[in-house]
Image (spheres, rainbow, N blue to C red):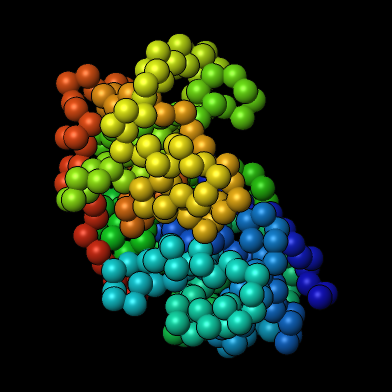
Amino acid sequence: MDLPIEPPIEPMLAKLARSIPAGDNWLFEPKWDGFRCIVFRDGDEVELFSRKLRPLARYFPELIGPLSAALPRRCVVDGEIVVADPTGNGLDFDALLQRIHPADSRVKRLAVETPAAFVAFDLLATDDGSLLDAPMTTRRDALVETIVENEAVHLTPATTDRAVAEDWFHRFEGAGLDGIVAKPLDGVYQPGKRSLTKVKHQRTADCAVAGYRIHKDGNGVGSLLLGLFDSNGDMQSVGVAASFSVKRRAELLAELEPRTHDALEGHPWRSWAEHTDVDADAATAGGSRWNAGKDLSFTPIMMGLVAEVSFGQLEGRRFRHGVGFLRWRPDRTPESCTYDQLDVAEPVSFQDFVTTA
């Protein structure tokens, strides 16, 4: 390839904020829950690179044709690869994860069964040269003029109206909107820098604490294993709470170690704890095809502790992204921690949202 920007290039990133920023110097866009992807096109050559600078084209062969039809012959475009739920319930992140597979036969089959789409939100270069030093307003105008949308390539909605962004944030979460990204209108594109602002959905839940894992450095508690009870009375693994300070990791170990004695008596995950050398069930023990080969062992504790945690989204029966520990809930029992308490967004069609603007 012979482009003004040679592949690969790090994408510009965002720092987390508590609320959508005020002022008239912002362009607001959806924060899509997919795979970040920068597309490089030079004539008949089309290459896709992930946030970690890894090639993605072999995993999404069905996008090459639509991207060639939608983009000019020489350009660099930043965006997101997503997979829409076929029933119209927003985006299907689990189906997207399944696309990263070493077997070509599986990749080709899934390209037909769960085809991906590309949502474009920034233009970094054209045949005329690099746009990295151009302000956001110039890059957005050029992107709008450049993209020819089709069934698999979309232009992300964008607005300078904060009230509209607030409406999107709340109304279209069920479409796979992971939050809102705010971009300075006069900002240039800074690869690898957190020059943008993101606001993500946050909810709370009370979860049973089933055990813990020691931090990777060997000192203190690295994560707490969380569970919720389903309608059958089985405790399902929903994720872990982590990111504790060094001091708090040591405190947690001192608090929880006394609860490890005779912890397996009546423990709902006793089988998992006693058989760490076999595959854990994905629903009840936290295992999945994505952590195959990973050590899933943990230290069980006597049931009785409940933690209030913050989370963003529920993907299937587990929390997506990180879960934050807020506080202990001594007024709750583990059995009272059920899925019924969760506030989950109503499903919205991906197509309905992407055509909003």
Q: Percent from the top left, x then y, of residue 282?
A: 42, 53
Tell me how many marks there are. Answer: 0
Residue for point 45% across, 78% down = 114
The residue sitting at 51% across, 63% down in the picture is 97
The quadrant of the image that shows the C terminus is bottom left
Left/right placement of residue 265 relative to residue 211 reads: left
Residue 337 percent location from the top left of the image: 21, 37
Residue at the location (57% across, 54% down)? 292
The residue lying toward the viewer, choosing from 213 and 300, is: 300
The answer to whether residue 63 shows anywhere in this view is no
Residue 334 versus residue 158 in the image, above or below: above
Q: Is residue 20 left or right of residue 150?
A: left
The answer to which quarter of the image holds residue 36 is: bottom right
Front residue of 81/115: it is 115
Give x and y (percent) for residue 137.
53, 60
The single residue placed furthest to the right in the displayed view is: 2
Q: Residue at x 64, y 44 (%)?
A: 193
Task: Pick the quarter of the image with the N terminus.
Answer: bottom right
With respect to residue 339, does 95 lie above or below? Answer: below
Q: Position of residue 342 (x, y in %)?
A: 22, 45
Quarter of image, res 331: top left
The residue lying toward the viewer, choosing from 230 and 248, is: 230
Residue 231 visible in rendering: yes
